Image (cartoon, grey):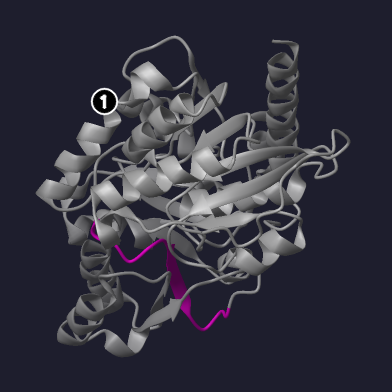
Amino acid sequence: MGENNSVQLNNNEPIRILHCVAGISRGGYETYIMNLYRNIDRTKVQFDFLYSFGGVYKKEILEMGGRIYKIPFITEKGPFAYTNAVRKFFREHPEYKIVHSHMDKFSGLIMREAKRAGVPVRISHSHSVANAGLFIYRVVKNFYGTMIKPNCTHRFACSKEAGQWLFGNRDDILVVKNGINLDDFTVRDTRDREKFVISCVGRLAPEKNHSFLLDVFSEVYKQRPDAQLVLAGTGSEQESLEKKAEALGIGAAVDFMGDCDKVYELLHRTDVMCLPSLFEGLGIVFVEAQACGVKCVASDRVPQEAKVSDDIIFLPLEKGAKYWAEQILALDTTVRNDNHKTISQRGYDISEVSRKLQEFYIEKNSACGEK
């Protein structure tokens, strides 16, 4: 199970935090955790990962001193095998004093098993505002979600809405901002003036609503034959989206670019960033785009906390594709605004987020030692 099983024995070593995630690929919250990891003082705090699939970040994690442990996910071998794997992991790794789970309602199982194993600090971190997947999958997730309240010690969320969705209306939810590296997301303009580029960064999954985006782009394309739609991300919807683009007659103007490890480079050549999500925990890509001075169009299902400048508008999905296209075409994309100061003041500078989280880990770890 373990891919690097050395155990912390030396008190001079950094505190090791176990992050529990579904995968270690370029999803939203996985990228956020990696941003934290890159900016935290790794001589004081180290991140280890319990995960089930993906592996884009595996090499980098190991190079930074992290340890990774793989177990089969519930969708691979069923709930009993998954439960047993989690239970066995905690039984074999009593060294962890802080467990930080990012699996929304599935965090309930992590919290329960960590509590049973005697882990004193158990953090459940919400990154969403809705259940995704088929009906039976949502039922299973809801069952695990009931385990969070009696077993977690701390409740984190990327936004107020994400916190309310997972934990209800409570006063003890800590909103931990999804910080970004402002040194990467600079106000830089590398646009091709002979094209009108609309970009979208997100998994090709139903909740991101790419099918509607293709309808919107089809309307834009009728007015702007120089328009290009760039979709960064991979996922289960790719084949059906490619077929729809061809059916709409826009196939040649839609670029399915796959995973994008340098989102800022795409944003630097973007005129408008558009993501008509059905739901979002926050929508960190909107913060990234605004940091680059790119105009953004979001659905009104995206939390208002994603508005860190005047460079974003929220539109109702009910207005339809033609209305969305009209709003996109009406945007003044000639000027790039520098929103860095505002973004930093709103708490989205990753260096500051990492510093605060590091202080939290160190404080809680010290409290464990005093007991």
The reply, left or right, for residue 364 in relation to residue 305 is right
Q: Which residue is mark 1?
A: 146
Rendering coords of residue 75 (x, y %)? 26, 58
Residue closest to the eye, 76 or 268: 76
Which image quadrant for residue 219?
A: bottom left
Viewer-side residue, 17 vs 155 = 17
Which x, y percent locates residue 254?
A: 35, 81
Q: Is residue 294 visible?
A: no
Q: Which residues are magenta?
A: 192-206
Screen quadrant of the C terminus: top right
For this orientation, the residue located farthest to the bottom is: 252
Q: Quadrant of residue 216?
A: bottom left
Q: Is residue 326 left or right of residue 356?
A: left
Residue 40 against residue 98 in the figure, above or below? below
Residue drawn where x is 18% and y is 48% of the image: 137
- In the rendered image, the residue lying farthest to the right is 12
Seen in the image, is 307 located left or right of residue 208? right
Viewer can see residue 20: yes
**x, y percentage for residue 128?**
36, 39
The percent position of residue 208, horizontal first and vertical second, equals 30, 56
